[in-house]
Image: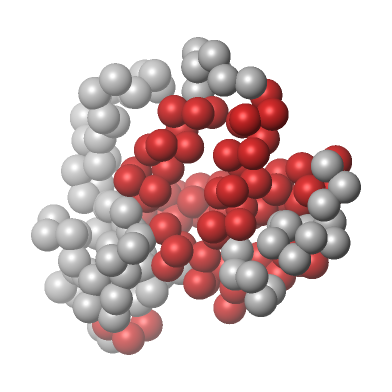
Amino acid sequence: MSNQTSTSKNRAEWADDPRSIYFILPGHNVELREGDRIREEDGIPKTGSSVATALAAGLTALIIHYVRLGAVYSWHRGRVNDGNAVNEDSVRAIKRHGVIREAPMRISAGYTDKNRRLEVESFFRDPAKVLDPYNRVTDESKWEKVAQLARDLVSSNT
């Protein structure tokens, strides 16, 4: 994933070739949202390509982790041969460059060649409510939500 800083939610002006940019992630004045449970050490918004790079790496790791958990759930429920289930082949596939590069496109319904900004927050908002440890949802419902996220992130033909 290529990433850059931007104040206008578009690629940075200094980006050489927009065709080499797959996604745009925040990298300018990034701060925690009100209500986040993580405490900032100094409260100063962070800026720089290192911020966007960290977000890209974290998102990639999260995608791979969800697919792995989805495969674990499928195995545990005896659904590994179900055509819609995420399985061991899905885990191998998501680690390939072409597949992991496509996964974030599923996060943003509005992703196009001209709009490469990822709508991570809106994609994960409802699942986060189900997975919140303070939510009184059953463990089975939480696992079902994880499996659904994994299916949403990995193509059915991988």
Count of numbered badges drawn on the protein: 0
Q: Nearer the viewer, residue 106 or 83?
A: 83
Residue at point 34% right, 23% down? 36
| Left or right side of 113 for 95 | right
Give the quarter of the image for residue 2.
bottom left
Image quadrant where residue 124 sits = top left
Q: How is the image coloured?
A: secondary structure
Residue 91 seen in the current view: no
Quadrant location of the C terminus?
bottom right
User: Residue 10, position in %: x, y?
Assistant: 18, 66
Direction from residue 152 to residue 112 in the image, left or right: left
Horizontal placement of 39 versus 136: left or right?
left
Asked if 111 appears above or below 67 in the picture, the reply is below
Residue 76 % position (x, y) = 85, 41
Rendered image quadrant of residue 12 = bottom left
- Residue plotted at (77% across, 43% down): 73
- At x 69% / y 62%, what residue is drawn? 84
Q: In this view of the protein, which residue sits in the foreground, 3 or 62?
A: 62
Residue pictured at 60% horizontal, 64% vertical? 154
Q: Position of residue 25 (x, y in %)?
A: 32, 57
In the displayed structure, would residue 42 be above or below residue 98? above
Q: Nearer the viewer, residue 3 or 108?
A: 108
Does residue 132 appear in this view? yes
Residue 134: image location, x then y, percent = 50, 13
Q: Is residue 118 left or right of residue 45?
A: right
